[in-house]
Amino acid sequence: MKLYRNIIFFLIAILCMGVFVGCNEDETLDGASEVYITLNPMDITLRVGDTIKISAVVTNLSGNRIETPITWTVLDEDVAKVLGDTAIVCVTGAQGKETKLKAELVNGKYALTNVTVTTNLPEGITPIDESGAIISSKHSYNITHDSVLFAVSPKELLEDFEPQYTIEGLEPFRIPMTVYKDKGLVAVHYSAPRAAGEGKITVSIGDGSSAKTASCTVVSAPKLLATFYGEKFAEMPYLGTRPDRSVLPQWFAYTNESSMDINSEMTIRVAINTESGALEDIEAAYSSYHWEAISGSAVVISEKYEEFVENQGFDAVLTVRAGIEEGEAEFHCITSDTVLVATFSVQDYKNRYPVDKITVSHESIKMPVGDFIMFTTGVEPIASYAYHKPVVVAENPNIIEVGEYDGNLIILKGLEIGETKLILTSNGKQLEVPVTITEGIKSVLWEKGNQRVLFAGQSVQWGVDARTTSDGPNPYEVKWISSDTSILKAAQVDKDNTKGIITAVTSGTATIIAEVANVRSDDVSVKVIDLPADQTYTSSNTDYDNTIVIPAENERDLLVYVALISGQKLTITLTGAYSGGSYDGTYQVSSYPASVNIDEAEAPVTSGYVTLASDNDGNVLISFDLIVSVTSDKTFTLKADNVVGLQ
């Protein structure tokens, strides 16, 4: 029994060993569920003459190395080349360019790293950035620990001499200097304040007159985002008005080209935002920019100042004045991060761009109180308009309000009843436009009987009653508005401002509104139905209980109601056909004008007859043959033969 127990324990142990072995991934490319490629080195910086060895380690999820072939390539071989899958060198002339080094496995998986080609360092000591590029200055603000790197060439100088440093205008860090002899680098460490200013780091190495020295300026200023903005930049997203901090990283204008007249002033604005929007950083930013005259004397600075913008930054505002001579001038707005260029072209507008005539869209203006008119201006020749846009003023601004220009358009508004004039001036020319402001509109009401169901293609006349504030008749034209002109069209009847023509285009529903001097009627829903097909009515397809002949309320007309079992309802109106007594007889349309109404859509009958005859049971037998005309080319026929109805 003991022997069996030992054998069982032995088998369990073997099985457990197999389980643990099975938990380890296969150390092959095909057997690994995950593959990791580690490149050495990463972020390669090359100079002409450098040969840097490259290698890669491939591991599985367990961290075990996988032996597998690796193919090395450079994405842009005009920048660098691979030597025998073991090293990389740069291509002559590629200084300042970048590419990527690619290590690819046979299964298609790959890894990339950056390759930057920079210039060789001059012999001696040189300030550089993290990529190895030569620098002369560095930006550093509100940071406890920062440093400037200096490259020593040849690096063996660090074996012979101890480098010396000075830190001016900055606080030294607790360990001010670190020397990397193997790399030929010296790092000088400092703290930058939360204030605008400038410091300098200097490192020297060697003795006496043979010592090598280099300096790097450290600019202490908040990160600034700047752009020109204003009306002339309105076509650029977000720059027509002042952009906030969320806009500037994506949208900006670094140049501003302006034209101005002699003896004139112009103001331009630069929006300068700090990254944080904090008050301390905005105050520091005031000292982190300046305007500088670069060339030309056609304009002089008449004013410059900062305009604070809470939680954003400030506007750098520059006003310049042109003299009496034409010319050019260029100014730069220089921040710690950006240079913005403003150019001014001064021209004699009066002589360069003459105006022969002022043109307007309205030779005279008449409108009610509260109404608006779109008024456009122009000049001849047209090319002068951009330089001599007419100035428009009201002789009496209490009567009419003159809005601001939008392109060549100005909105005028009637303020009170009276007469005045608009006075337009442009480059010595003047034009006067008479203005009459009349009584306003109190109400716009629909006349009764306007037909609200139409056949497609049908046109009907509607009535509207607009009244002035003194309850007088409407002296203005009516604007007829359809909510959907593909279904329904509406327009005033010639010069009759009490009538409108409503035209049904196709089946559907639309609303109609009448508007007078910015006063609107109630909107009315109008239904358009398809033109009916020819129809024959019989006793078998009509509803006896709802088929009836009766006189109209005016006791002169006769009404014939015929209802189909399907639900359609027909009304025939025979004008003047009732004179009392029996309905029996034949009524010719030529003698008794008739119209039909089908499901509330009404149209005239152009020809035909209606015959009514009583039977012995007190019923009426209805017969008719009618041609109904919706338009001259849209007609349909209705027929009936002894349809039984009530009377």
Image: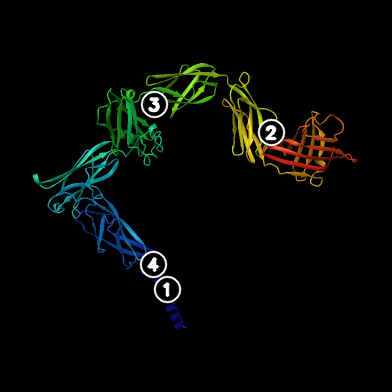
SS at mark 2?
A: loop
Label pair 1/3, CB-CB below 8 angstroms: no
Indicate which disc residue 32 carries.
Answer: 4
Label 2 amino acid? Gln
Q: Is residue 498 something one can see in this rendering? A: yes
Closer mark to the observer between disc 1 and disc 3: 3
Pair 3/2: label in front: 3
**Label 1 is placed on what type of residue?**
Cys
Question: Which of marks 3 and 1 precedes in the sequence?
Answer: 1
Where is residue 267 shown, x and y percent of the image?
34, 28
Query: Which residue lies at the image location 84% right of the left edge and 29% below the top edge?
Result: 579
The amino acid type of the residue labelled 3 equals: Pro
Residue at 74 percent of width and 36 percent of height: 605
Considering the numbered disc 1 on the image, is that residue within a helix, a strand or a loop?
helix
Residue type at mark 4: give it.
Answer: Ala
Distance between the alpha carbons at the discs numbered 3 and 4: 80 Å
Q: Is residue 443 left or right of residue 87?
A: right
Q: CA distance from mark 1 to mark 3?
A: 99 Å
Q: How many C-alpha atoms fall within 10 Å of the one at disc 2: few (<14), some, or many (≥20)?
A: some
Q: Is residue 111 above or below residue 419?
A: below
Whether residue 230 is visible, yes or no, is no
* Residue topped by disc 1: 16
Task: Quadrant for residue 358, please give it.
Answer: top left
- Which mark, residue 451? 2
Relative vertical location of residue 259 with respect to residue 396 in this rendering, above or below: below
Q: Earlier in the sequence, mark 4 or mark 1?
A: 1
Foreground residue among 127 and 510? 510
Residue 565: % across, % down: 78, 45
In which quadrant of the rendered view does residue 606 lie? top right
